[in-house]
Amino acid sequence: MNAIVQPKRALEEFLKLPETEPASEFIEGEILQKPMPQGEHSVLQYELCKTINQLAQTQKIAKAFPELRCTFGGKSIVPDIAVFRWERIPFLPSGRIANIFEINPDWSIEILSPNQSQTKVLGKLLHCSRQGTELGWLLDPEEESILAVFPGQKVELYRGTDRLPIINGIELELTVDNIFSWLTFG
């Protein structure tokens, strides 16, 4: 029995579609809906954004955006956290932030959800790297590990007390243990 192959939609067509909840992404000509975030994912996303922004936003170095659609390099993705250097954040002539980001993030952070394909999520980070993103992180809460993607698509694994790489200019010191300790309350 032959599978029915859906015609691939053009990126322009995809961008005209209404947003979904959770967000859908356009990758390799396919529309893929992200999984609904669960407890651990939500805590990690919130705490990382807060931690990065407390330092980087107040000094106008960078800003971390949760669930921001970024369209570049023929794909439209929604990283769990997209960090942009201050000078690269698109602003309107009025000074307000633009709604549409047609550039790659400087730092892209993804948090693996249960039953989510690590390969597909890593593929998004590798796409970002090919398009000029300085750093990518893939957090795996179950394994309590973080894969980092560097320029040239170099990938390193971090665990435990390993100090994590941060984009230049953000003086932040975090270990893998620091990040996953946010999942324990009390």
Image: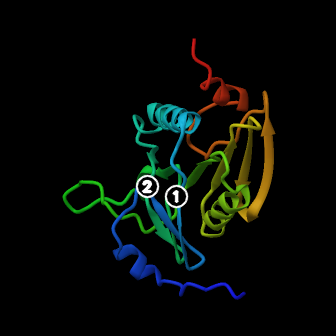
Image coordinates for residue 58, horizontal then vertical, percent:
39, 34
Give whichever of discs 1 and 2 has the lower sequence position.
Answer: 2
In the picture of the structure, the residue carrying the numbered disc 2 is 68
Q: Which mark is residue 179?
A: none
Residue 153 picture quarter: bottom right
Q: Amino acid at mark 1?
A: Pro
Rendered image quadrant of residue 150: bottom right
Disc 1 is placed on an element classified as loop
Q: Position of residue 88 (x, y in %)?
A: 43, 58
Apparent side of residue 117 relative to residue 63 in the rendered image (left or right):
right
Question: Residue visible at 59% across and 49% down?
Answer: 109
> In the picture, which quadrant includes the N terminus?
bottom right
Q: Disc 2 on helix, strand or loop?
A: loop
Q: Position of residue 66 (x, y in %)?
A: 45, 46
**Residue extending farthest top:** 186
Question: Which residue lies at the image location 46% right of the left edge and 69% below the top edge?
Answer: 71
Amino acid carrying label 2: it is Leu
Q: Quadrant of residue 162?
A: top right
Q: Mark 1 = which residue?
A: 105
Q: Residues within 10 Å of mark 2 (few under 14, many from 20)?
A: some
Whether 36 is drawn above or below 132: the answer is above
